[in-house]
């Protein structure tokens, strides 16, 4: 039997790679993980966590405005962007330290440098060649942008999290998760934000009522959304950026951020040499056991382009470590995966959209609620919450649940448990509400929306 340096070498120390490696180490396997950046990956260093800290920071602008009608006098409030960024970075350092400790505590060797597959059992890291019986690719993704003239002048979410100062005006291109989340942050902090989307609506793939409601709320907050608009080119004159739009109009701004999707980080990894096949978009093809086309090489997380969410990558990494070193063949369940867009206000969702449910079941029953949350009856803020349940009438099962509004992510996480258990509308109705709350609407929706003509 071949003698390898390691039982498992993982390339990429993000959420999925760290989970798989530290569990494998904990099960007694000999494990190394290599990383060319700091340990933590997109979620900890450039994604979910820093983004959410900026969102928390931005929300204080709303809280202060809303507090006035609750009797508060707030004078002389101002925001220090540099302080927020510095404090956010201190927190990221702390998290990075926790990740390092977790790896150490589970006897995982950290190898710093870019890992390249030399052959299907050998990884070269900073000039050192190491062999492993199993290899895991967990290198994640990176922002991708269209190749238009002047694209070198734009930033992505990576740089937006590190801006030295807030611009006066900002253009955000894209209508996905990242674009709408950052539009909310910068606009709350006083930046004049214009969002440019090529489609007629934001958040393709989400339920139509959530998309339309968030579009309206964003516009109410002063975010200008230019729909069905493309950017042809960008020119920089001094500090001003001029965007030539598809209709030949020129739009001037101080900062342009692109959030037009992310691509798997598979270039320069030596995957072809190791017999690992990719899709046209660069992502790695895997089966339900996270196995690539080379049977002892595995991949988890964004690099596989299944569902690009941290908790999914973690589940995949967990399942892989269990399968390889803990005699477990559990697979990741991709049904009813809840997700949230931390827009302002946020959206959260689990299950099917109305469009998907109609395609799958034909007729479906829709229950919805559109209301001003209690907190805003006094604050005076013109912001609504929208909730929607989609029910398959034959079984009475709730197959989709969507919310736009305050606390949506916190509320939908609980509803996702009910949906995972196959809850019926009758069981939702039999649940006692928590009063007064927005969440109680999900158990008090009694009237069906009339069927479409
Ligand atoms: P998304 O895939 O969500 O959205 C990409 C957006 O860019 C779409 O609006 C798309 O338009 C638009 N677009 C794509 N190509 C072009 C182009 N050439 N010109 C103009 N517009 C273009 O990508 P994101 O970058 O926002 O996020 C990447 C992934 O990261 C998400 O899919 C999500 O899984 C994950 N993520 C999750 C978060 C969360 O859970 N809260 C937060 C942030 C990211 P169109 O609709 O027309 O295709």
Image (spheres, rainbow, N blue to C red):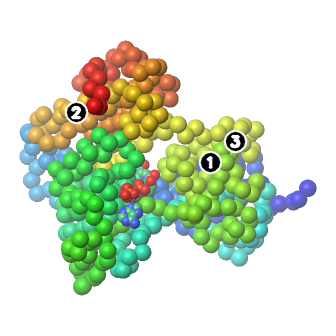
* Quadrant of the rendering where the N terminus is positioned: bottom right
Q: Please, what secondary structure does the residue beneath circle 2 have?
A: strand
Classify residue 31 as left or right of residue 95. Answer: right
Residue at the location (64% across, 55% down)? 285
Q: Nearer the viewer, mark 1 or mark 2?
A: 2
Residue at disc 3, secondary structure: helix
Q: Which residue is mark 1?
A: 317
- For residue 442, side relative to residue 250 (left or right): right
Q: Is residue 186 visible?
A: no
The disc placed on residue 322 is 3
Q: Is residue 294 left or right of residue 395?
A: right
Quarter where residue 240 is shown = bottom left
Q: Residue furthest front?
A: 453
Query: Where on the picture, by quarter, is residue 170?
Result: bottom left
- Residue for point 50% across, 51% down: 308
For the residues labelled 3 and 2, the Cα–Cα distance comes to: 44 Å
Q: CA distance from mark 1 to mark 2?
A: 39 Å
- Where in the figure is residue 119, as x and y percent of width and height? 77, 68
Is there any visible trace of residue 419 in the rendered image? yes
In the foreground, 91 or 384: 384
The image shows residue 85 at horizontal and vertical percentages of 33, 63
Residue 60 falls left or right of residue 38: left
Mark 1 or mark 3, earlier in chain = 1
Badge 1 crowding class, 10 Å Cα cut-off, few under 14, some 14 to 19, many 20 or more, is many
Label drawn at residue 370:
2
| Mark 3 vs ligand 1: CB below 8 Å | no
């Amino acid at each position: 039997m071949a003698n390898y340096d390691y039982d498992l070498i993982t390339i990429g120390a993000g959420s999925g790679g760290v989970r798989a490696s530290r569990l494998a180490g904990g099960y007694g396997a000999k494990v190394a993980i290599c990383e060319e950046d700091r340990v933590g990956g997109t979620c900890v260093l450039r994604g979910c966590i820093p983004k959410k800290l900026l969102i928390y920071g931005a929300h204080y602008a709303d809280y202060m405005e809303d507090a006035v009608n609750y009797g508060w006098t707030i004078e002389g409030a101002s925001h220090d962007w540099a302080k927020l960024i510095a404090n956010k970075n201190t927190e990221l350092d702390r998290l990075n330290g926790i990740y390092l400790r977790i790896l150490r505590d589970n006897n995982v060797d950290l190898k710093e440098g870019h890992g390249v597959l030399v052959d299907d059992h050998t990884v070269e890291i900073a000039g050192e060649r190491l062999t492993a019986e199993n290899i895991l690719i967990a290198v994640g993704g990176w922002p991708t942008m269209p190749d238009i003239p002047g694209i070198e002048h734009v930033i992505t979410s990576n740089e937006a999290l590190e801006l030295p100062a807030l611009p006066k005006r900002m253009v955000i291109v894209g209508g996905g998760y990242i674009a709408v989340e950052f539009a909310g942050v910068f606009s709350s902090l006083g930046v004049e934000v214009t969002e440019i989307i090529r489609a007629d609506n934001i958040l393709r793939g989400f339920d139509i009522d959530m998309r339309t409601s968030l579009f309206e709320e964003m516009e109410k907050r002063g975010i200008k959304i230019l729909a069905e608009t493309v950017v042809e080119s960008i020119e920089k004159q001094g500090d001003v950026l001029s965007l030539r739009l598809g209709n030949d109009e020129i739009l001037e701004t101080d900062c342009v951020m692109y959030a037009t999707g992310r691509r798997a980080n598979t270039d320069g990894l030596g995957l072809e040499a190791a017999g690992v096949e990719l899709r046209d978009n660069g992502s790695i093809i895997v089966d339900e056991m996270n196995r690539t086309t080379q049977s002892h090489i595995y991949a988890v997380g964004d690099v596989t382009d299944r569902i690009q969410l941290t908790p999914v990558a973690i589940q995949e990494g967990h399942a892989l470590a269990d399968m390889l070193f803990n005699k477990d063949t559990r697979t990741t369940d991709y049904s009813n995966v809840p997700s949230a867009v931390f827009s302002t206000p946020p959206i959260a969702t689990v299950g099917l959209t109305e469009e998907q449910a109609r395609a799958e079941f034909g007729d479906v029953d829709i229950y919805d609620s559109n209301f001003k949350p209690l907190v805003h009856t006094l604050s005076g803020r013109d912001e609504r919450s929208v909730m929607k349940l989609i029910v398959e009438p034959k079984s009475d099962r709730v197959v989709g649940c969507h919310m736009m509004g305050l606390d949506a992510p916190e509320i939908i996480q609980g509803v996702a448990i009910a949906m995972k258990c196959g809850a019926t509308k009758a069981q939702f109705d039999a649940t006692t509400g928590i009063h007064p709350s927005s969440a109680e609407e999900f158990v008090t929706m009694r009237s069906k929306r009339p069927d479409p003509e």
